[in-house]
Image: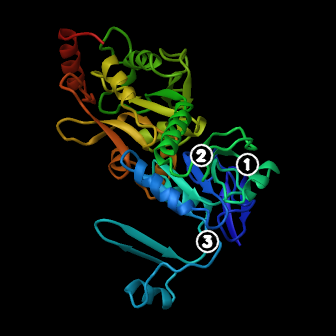
């Protein structure tokens, strides 16, 4: 019996990927963008999924889970990995420059599966027809599966697929596709994915919780445009975000210049920028976060709008690529909800660098234009230089 921890506590699993123990977390089972293709045996599920993957893979990195209650063999007799397995190894990994495979004993926990597929843009699941996953249902020749849908045994049906050109009086209010209409099904899946992504709220976060030790005064209060920089960033983010918060330490702005603005206090402490980012994602895990540090004086409306316009909600984040280093800039980025798993995993391994996490995660990067500048300011000398440069240049 495997145990899975989810938001409701500890839950039993029944030795496979289904059953009452496969609890939903944050509204999904294994991935925020997941679709099950289900049907009775020999209905053509695998054939359809492979054709859809072929059609959609140029635009998406697609995951695939096969729910198989039967015993299976995945290794080859005489191979090194098979010999190690037969010798009693618990967990085996084999990797080359093109692909990697894991084999382990037992059933993975729900969290392990979520972590393994978190880097995919979306996930196909073959099977799990009794779970609350959104489903494309393949209709068998005798149409027996339609009775299960009518009786409520199969729920969350988003579409039907069959061999007939048209089919009337289907038991759920869902579209019908011919099984060879792969392009039509692919378009339907894309539309659904983008509709789900559009429902993710975009919140803004101005990072101000640093100690500003080198500057010797709080960088959030420095003025480049006639008012505190944190307020300037707050106003810019307010133009593209549903809500905006100041990320701060508890009592940092009590009675101060920024106290009238909504705040999220750090509940993760001593982690640098991750303190504010994780605290925001803990407070509103359903939201994507447009995160901008208060020590980026050159960031303007144009740069922020271009970042949002180029956002890919299926990746873990969207960020600028810093010039001239060509490294990701995590402190002017959109963090998608699913990156929270990756951030917490890295925290557990002692990695507190958002840039390092981005470099080892599927993020979309946006090249900076010549007029975009993501230089940060950390010292009095840098502040004076930036202020002088901005006074001579254009506004926001």
Tag 2 near tag 3, CB within 8 Å: no
- Who comes first in sequence, dot 3 or dot 1? 3
Instruction: Say which residue label 3 marks.
Output: 107
Instruction: Say which residue label 2 marks.
Output: 165
- On the image, the x and y values in percent for residue 17 come to 64, 64
The residue at the far front in this view is 165
**Residue at disc 1, secondary structure:** loop
Q: Name the one closer to the observer, 383 or 17.
A: 17
Q: Is residue 93 left or right of residue 107?
A: left
Place residue 236 in its image quadrant. Answer: top left
Quote the CA–CA distance across marks 2 and 3.
Answer: 41 Å
Quote the CA–CA distance across marks 2 and 1.
Answer: 24 Å
**Residue at disc 3, secondary structure:** loop
Considering only vertical position in the picture, is 87 above or below 352? below
> Callout 2 environment at 10 Å: few (<14), some (14 to 19), or many (20+)?
few
> Callout 1 environment at 10 Å: few (<14), some (14 to 19), or many (20+)?
some
Instruction: Say which residue label 1 marks.
Output: 155
- Who comes first in sequence, dot 2 or dot 1? 1
**Residue at disc 2, secondary structure:** loop
> Callout 3 environment at 10 Å: few (<14), some (14 to 19), or many (20+)?
some
Considering only vertical position in the picture, is 352 above or below 99? above
């Amino acid at each position: 019996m495997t145990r899975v921890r989810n938001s409701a506590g500890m839950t039993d699993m029944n030795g496979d990927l289904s059953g009452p123990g496969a609890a939903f977390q944050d509204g999904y089972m294994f991935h925020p963008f997941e679709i099950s293709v289900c049907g009775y045996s020999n209905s053509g599920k695998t054939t359809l999924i492979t054709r859809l993957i072929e059609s959609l893979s140029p635009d998406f990195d697609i995951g695939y889970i096969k729910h198989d209650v039967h015993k299976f063999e995945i290794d080859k007799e005489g191979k090194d990995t098979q010999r190690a397995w037969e010798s009693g190894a618990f967990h085996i990994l084999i990797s080359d420059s093109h692909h990697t495979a894991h084999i382990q004993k037992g059933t993975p926990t729900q969290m392990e599966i979520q972590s393994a597929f978190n880097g995919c843009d979306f996930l196909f699941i073959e099977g799990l027809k009794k779970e609350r996953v959104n489903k494309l249902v393949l209709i068998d020749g005798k149409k027996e599966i339609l009775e299960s849908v009518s009786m409520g045994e199969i729920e969350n049906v988003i579409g039907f697929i069959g061999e007939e050109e048209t089919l009337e009086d289907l038991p759920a209010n869902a579209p019908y596709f011919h099984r060879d209409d792969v392009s039509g099904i692919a378009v339907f899946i894309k539309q659904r994915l983008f509709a789900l992504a559009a429902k993710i709220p975009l919140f803004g976060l101005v990072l101000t919780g640093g100690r500003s030790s080198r500057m010797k005064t709080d960088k959030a209060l420095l003025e480049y445009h006639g008012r505190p920089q944190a307020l300037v960033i707050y106003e810019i983010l307010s133009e593209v975000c549903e809500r905006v918060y100041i990320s701060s330490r508890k009592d940092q702005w009590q009675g101060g210049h920024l106290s009238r603005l909504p705040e999220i206090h750090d509940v993760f402490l001593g982690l640098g920028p991750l303190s504010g980012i994780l605290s925001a994602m803990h407070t509103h895990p359903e939201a994507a976060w447009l995160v901008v540090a208060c020590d980026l004086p050159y960031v303007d409306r144009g740069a922020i709008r271009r970042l949002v316009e180029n956002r890919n909600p299926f990746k873990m984040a969207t960020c600028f690529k810093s010039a001239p280093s060509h490294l990701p800039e995590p402190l002017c980025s959109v963090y998608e909800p699913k990156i929270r798993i990756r951030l917490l995993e890295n925290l557990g391994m002692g990695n507190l660098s958002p840039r390092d996490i981005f470099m080892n995660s599927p993020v979309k990067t946006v090249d900076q234009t010549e007029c975009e500048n993501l230089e940060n300011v950390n010292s009095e000398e840098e502040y004076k230089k930036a202020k002088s440069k901005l006074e001579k240049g254009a506004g926001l």
